[in-house]
Amino acid sequence: MNDDYEIDFEERSARQSTVFAIIISLIGITLYAQEIVQKDYISGDEWVFAILFGGLCGLIGFFSGMTFFKSRNPFGLFPPFIVFFIHSILFGDEPGDRFGEFMLQCFYLLLSLGITFFFFFYSDSYQLG
């Protein structure tokens, strides 16, 4: 097993990644609640959807932070923001105030992540070969 990618929270890079994940999570909650990545007004118990969406964004932010802080790859900082941009452009007019719609929003977020990874890997392979 490769010891370079173990998560040890006594290391500074893991703590920095956690802080970055919390910031990305708060941005995700704000974007969901302010009707930027979905079009429905959030009220009452529907705030749970915004918090869960923020948790998924935080997971993306954590892995992106580990790429940036542990591997020292400067491109690791950008994917969450590109994912938010792609998600808001392509899927921002979809509803998100019911459970089924929330699950579709989570799928759209992961689809936006896949599109972002495709562009990163496509541009990397295009430059190399």
Image: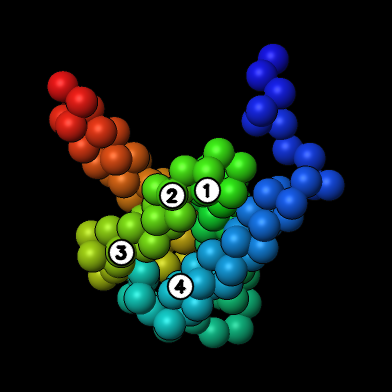
Work out which residue is located at the far right of the displayed protein and give it. Answer: 10
Q: Which of the two labelled residues, at mark 4 and mark 3, occupies the earlier sequence position?
A: 4
- The answer to whether one can see residue 97 in this image is no
Q: Which of the two labelled residues, at mark 1 and mark 4, occupies the earlier sequence position?
A: 4
Q: CA distance from mark 4 to mark 3?
A: 13 Å
The image's colouring method is rainbow
Mark 3 vs mark 1: give the one in front: 1
- Classify 10 Å Cα crowding around label 1: few (below 14), some (14-19), many (20 and above): some
In the rendered view, does 96 fall on the left or right side of 90? right
User: Split into 4 quadrants, where in the image is the C terminus?
Assistant: top left
Q: Which of the two labelled residues, at mark 4 and mark 2, occupies the earlier sequence position?
A: 4
Q: Which of the two labelled residues, at mark 2 and mark 1, occupies the earlier sequence position?
A: 1
Circle number at residue 32: 4
Q: Residue at x 25, y 33 (%)?
A: 124
Mark 2 vs mark 3: give the one in front: 2
- Classify 10 Å Cα crowding around label 4: few (below 14), some (14-19), many (20 and above): many
On the image, the x and y values in percent for residue 3 come to 71, 23
Q: Residue at x 18, y 32 (%)?
A: 127
Give the residue type at disc 4.
Tyr
Asked if marks 1 and 4 touch (Cβ < 8 Å), the reply is no
Q: CA distance from mark 4 to mark 2?
A: 27 Å
Mark 4 vs mark 2: give the one in front: 2
In the image, 71 versus 53, the foreground residue is 71
In the rendered view, does 94 fall on the left or right side of 101? left
User: Against 33, is 108 above or below?
Assistant: above
Circle 3 — which element? helix
Q: Which residue is mark 3?
A: 85
Q: Which of the two labelled residues, at mark 3 and mark 1, occupies the earlier sequence position?
A: 1
Circle 1 — which element? helix
Asked if marks 2 and 1 touch (Cβ < 8 Å), the reply is yes
Q: Which residue is mark 2?
A: 74
